[in-house]
């Protein structure tokens, strides 16, 4: 007899921009579970098609913690589902869920992006259970498994869809949000400013593409050794909540000063912007200003987004503040210096050298240990698919619903010798 999930009640909060959470809820209902969705603005409402299970929260932010706890009790919630665990409305709901012994399902962008997404229970990034696991723990869990792992893809497969759904979401919030008078964004910018930045980025994509091609060509044909700085978004939770820097300029200062003091005089430093960088922080101007102050402006380059592989393939090393792009550097065996908290910050992979020493002669990672670590991720938290492309969502949903309905989280299942069935080798575009 097929197992019944009629006793499961899933409460959804905010998800990735677009239809993913709505489709996930529909499949959970098909499995027999009940679902509810709390919406905090018109964008949340627009992407949840099952109106009977939609609950608008129109109160003030300071009222949300009590309302979340009351909803969990009223609806008999067994599971909390959300995207990212640090925004204030999610953090307070997680606290209420833990107090009641509920299962917390956290989605995030893939640790091995772009063709994987992250699914964990309890927390992600700096709050992930991986933070407390050593490579030795992972190797023990992998004993007896034999899998030919796929290479890390070199490019994003759904960037246009990602930007489109972000713009559409902010359109609803900016122009149709009258019913949610108490809504406050978790970002520093207003909803209107966010919406205009999305529109500007969409309009300027051809210009940015040309700028990126020219900058990359200059670097590739320059003939000089270079180190690659993988930049985060300053407003992203991984930088804001899991790094030692208050602003991106603080990181740039430490990085450029170390490069100026330690790198050989013929080496260059290339700054690779995050693919979703939208100009709210004047990165290029700040980089040139700090580089000029340290006398290295002629050896510093800035590249907008684009394909990471073209730059990584010829780089001497990589430096970042917990960017998941560092995983592609490690896959290539590049020396890596990383700041903050990240799931890959293991002593086998990441250099502990001071910045000057790192730029002078960086130590290489233990590539065999990294392959075991990556194997562990692909058997647990990394799921083939995408939130934003239709094909990617279909592939993701084929796997993640059964994982959510399982009594064991992915890490427990592997450590108990019962890894979930996975689709590793079919990469989506």
Image (cartoon, rainbow, N blue to C red):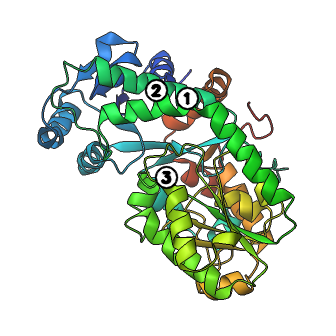
Above or below, 314 against 273 in this view is below
Q: What is the quadrant of residue 297 in the picture?
A: bottom right
The residue labelled by disc 1 is: 202
Quarter of the figure with the C terminus:
top right
Above or below 106: residue 227: below
Q: Earlier in the sequence, mark 3 or mark 2?
A: 2
Label 1 or label 3, whichever comes before in sequence order: 1
Q: Is residue 184 visible?
A: yes
Q: Are marks 2 and 1 in contact (CB under 8 Å)?
A: yes
Residue at the spot of label 2: 167
Residue ID for mark 3: 233
Residue occupying the point 73% across, 42% down:
155
Badge 1 marks a residue whose secondary structure is helix
Secondary structure state at the residue bearing disc 2: helix
How far separated are the C-alphas under marks 2 and 1? 9 Å
**Badges 3 and 2: C-beta atoms under 8 Å apart?**
no
Instruction: Please report the residue visible at 31 percent of the width from the left and 24 percent of the height from the top.
Output: 174
Residue 88 image offset from top left, x and y in percent: 27, 47
Residue 267 locus on image (x, y percent): 76, 76
């Amino acid at each position: 007899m097929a197992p019944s999930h009629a006793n499961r009640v899933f409460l959804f909060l905010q998800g990735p921009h677009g239809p993913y959470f709505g489709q996930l809820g529909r499949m959970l209902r098909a499995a027999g579970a009940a679902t509810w969705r709390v919406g905090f603005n018109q964008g949340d409402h627009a992407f949840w098609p099952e109106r009977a299970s939609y609950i608008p929260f129109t109160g003030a932010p300071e009222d949300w913690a009590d309302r979340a706890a009351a909803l969990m009790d009223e609806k008999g919630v067994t599971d909390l589902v959300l995207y990212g665990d640090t925004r204030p409305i999610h953090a307070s709901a997680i606290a209420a869920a833990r107090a009641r012994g509920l299962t917390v399902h956290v989605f995030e962008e893939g640790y091995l992006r772009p063709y994987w997404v992250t699914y964990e229970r309890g927390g992600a990034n700096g709050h992930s259970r991986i933070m407390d696991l050593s490579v030795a723990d992972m190797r023990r869990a992998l004993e007896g498994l034999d899998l030919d792992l796929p290479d890390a893809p070199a490019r994003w497969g759904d960037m246009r869809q990602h930007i489109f759904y972000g713009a559409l979401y902010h359109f609803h919030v900016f122009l149709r949000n009258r019913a949610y008078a108490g809504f406050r964004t978790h970002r520093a910018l207003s909803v209107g400013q966010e919406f205009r930045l999305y529109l500007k980025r969409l309009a300027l994509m051809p210009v940015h593409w040309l700028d990126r091609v020219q900058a990359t060509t200059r670097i590739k044909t320059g003939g000089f050794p270079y180190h690659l700085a993988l930049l985060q978004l300053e407003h992203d939770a991984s930088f804001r909540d899991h790094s030692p820097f208050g602003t991106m300029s603080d990181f740039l200062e430490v990085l450029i000063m170390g490069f100026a003091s330690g790198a050989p005089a013929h080496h260059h430093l290339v700054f690779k912007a995050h693919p979703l960088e939208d100009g709210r922080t004047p990165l290029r101007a700040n980089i040139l200003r700090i580089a000029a102050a340290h006398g290295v402006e002629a050896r510093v380059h800035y590249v907008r987004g684009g394909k990471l592989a073209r730059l990584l393939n010829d780089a001497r090393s990589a430096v970042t503040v917990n960017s998941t792009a560092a995983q592609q550097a490690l896959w290539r065996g590049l020396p890596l210096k990383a700041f903050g908290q990240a799931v890959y910050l293991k002593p086998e992979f990441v250099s502990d050298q001071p910045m000057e020493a790192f730029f002078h002669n960086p130590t290489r990672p233990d590539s065999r240990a990294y392959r075991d670590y990556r194997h562990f991720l692909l058997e647990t938290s990394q799921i083939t698919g995408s939130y934003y492309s239709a094909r990617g969502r279909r592939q993701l949903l084929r796997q993640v619903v059964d994982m959510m309905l399982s009594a064991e989280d992915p890490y427990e299942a592997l450590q108990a010798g019962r890894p979930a069935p996975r689709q590793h080798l079919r990469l989506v575009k």
